[in-house]
Amino acid sequence: MKVLVTGGAGYIGSHVVRQLGEAGHDIIVFDNLSTGYRWAVTCGELVVGDLADEAAIAGLFSEHRFEAVLHFAANIVVPESVENPLKYYSNNTRNTLNLLKAVEQHRVPYMVFSSTAAVYGMPEETVLTEDLPLAPINPYGASKMMSERMIMDLAAASSLNYVILRYFNVAGANPDGLLGQATPEATHLIKVACECVTGKRDGMSVFGTDYDTRDGTCIRDYIHVEDLAKAHVMALNYMADGGRSRVLNCGYGRGFTVREVIDVVKRKSGNDFPVQETGRRAGDPAALMADNSRIKKVLGWQPDYDDLDTIVGTALAWEKIWQERQG
Ligand code: UFG
């Protein structure tokens, strides 16, 4: 298939591009390189451009006849979205609208969209099904919820088919050491802990130890980026085989506490970096895990890396490569 991958130079997008290339797809990556990297595009062609630029989008779609669009390009930092909400509504929501105008005009049949568990907000449940009401508690989650809705509405009014994937906590890296998370100001737990190992940081904080969980710290469903990437390739195959539009959670359906994650990073690295226990971070639900029965049933998806040691091991290996590469 001829596919457009927006944000394909970023962390998750670059892993998906690699798997799409291995599956034989013909790939155009469109990325403004604001948080992505040229080196991360290991298959297909990179077009540097911004989804705010409607003329650039029009040019791209007139040059290529895309059968599918995979839309990753977005800002993803929750606290930043609280401070600067319009950045999120511009870069995430409005730019998705810009992209959808071209999808509609050129009658692109298939779309895969990167959504997030942040659309669920602070649910009472800890294992989340896709049918829960959407109640995001920050502009990041709201910007993604609105994008989901636009895609659904366009699909209802046209021949577009979509798979919306709601990611839980994505971590890890390509096991060959070719790709990984290179975000400059990372805030994600596993990335932060790995940066302590390489010495990029002197230590880290645990945000909250008084949650109602097995050790008082928050529980999250960490999913390896290669398993997540596989879900995208399978979503394309599913739609090409006539599958109907779906919203699917992407997670393993189990969780680890912050302390458990830090312990694994310390054990696997043999490095005992300083960890400070501080107060709760605003907007953190105690426990979030995916009910993944739907993605397993609909796509036949099964994880290959459902093991925290493997997730942390690949993240650590990548972090060392990345820090050395930067000098
Ligand atoms: N944490 C720490 N110290 C750190 C970083 C994180 O204790 O230095 C804790 C957080 O408080 C939280 C857990 O580790 O309890 C995981 O935090 P992350 O920032 O890694 O991930 P989140 O669960 O906050 O966010 C993830 C995605 C978001 C998405 C959200 C939906 O990164 O994009 O899940 O629940 F919005």
Image (cartoon, rainbow, N blue to C red):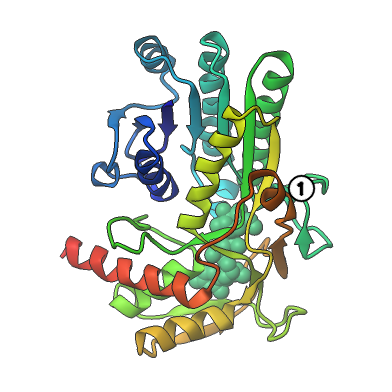
Instruction: Write down the residue under mark 1.
Output: 130
Kind of residue at badge 1: Glu
Q: Can residue 113 be seen in this view?
A: no
As drawn, which residue projects farthest toward the front?
Answer: 241
Image-quadrant location for residue 163: top right
Residue 308 lies, in percent from the top left, at 52, 75
Quadrant for ligand 1 reads: bottom right
The quadrant of the image that shows the N terminus is top left
Image-quadrant location for residue 43: top left
Of residue 254 and residue 278, the one placed in the foreground of this image is: 254
Query: Residue at image x 60%, y 35%?
Result: 238
**How many residues crowd around disc 1 within 10 Å: few (fewer than 14), some, or many (20 or more)?**
some
Residue 156 lies, in percent from the top left, at 74, 19
Left/right of residue 318 with respect to residue 78 in the rendered view: left
**Number of labelled discs?**
1
Q: Can residue 223 be seen in this view?
A: yes
Question: Which element is circle 1 on?
Answer: loop
Of residue 291 and residue 95, the one placed in the foreground of this image is: 291
The quadrant of the image that shows the C terminus is bottom left
Of residue 212 and residue 289, the one placed in the foreground of this image is: 289
User: Would you say the beta carbon of the disc 1 residue lies within 8 angstroms of ligand 1?
Assistant: no
Residue 102 lies, in percent from the top left, at 51, 14
Q: In this view, does 131 lie above or below 59?
A: below
Query: Residue at image x 36%, y 77%?
Result: 196
Q: Is residue 239 above or below residue 126?
A: above
Left/right of residue 124 with respect to residue 313 in the rendered view: right
Residue 79 lies, in percent from the top left, at 56, 55
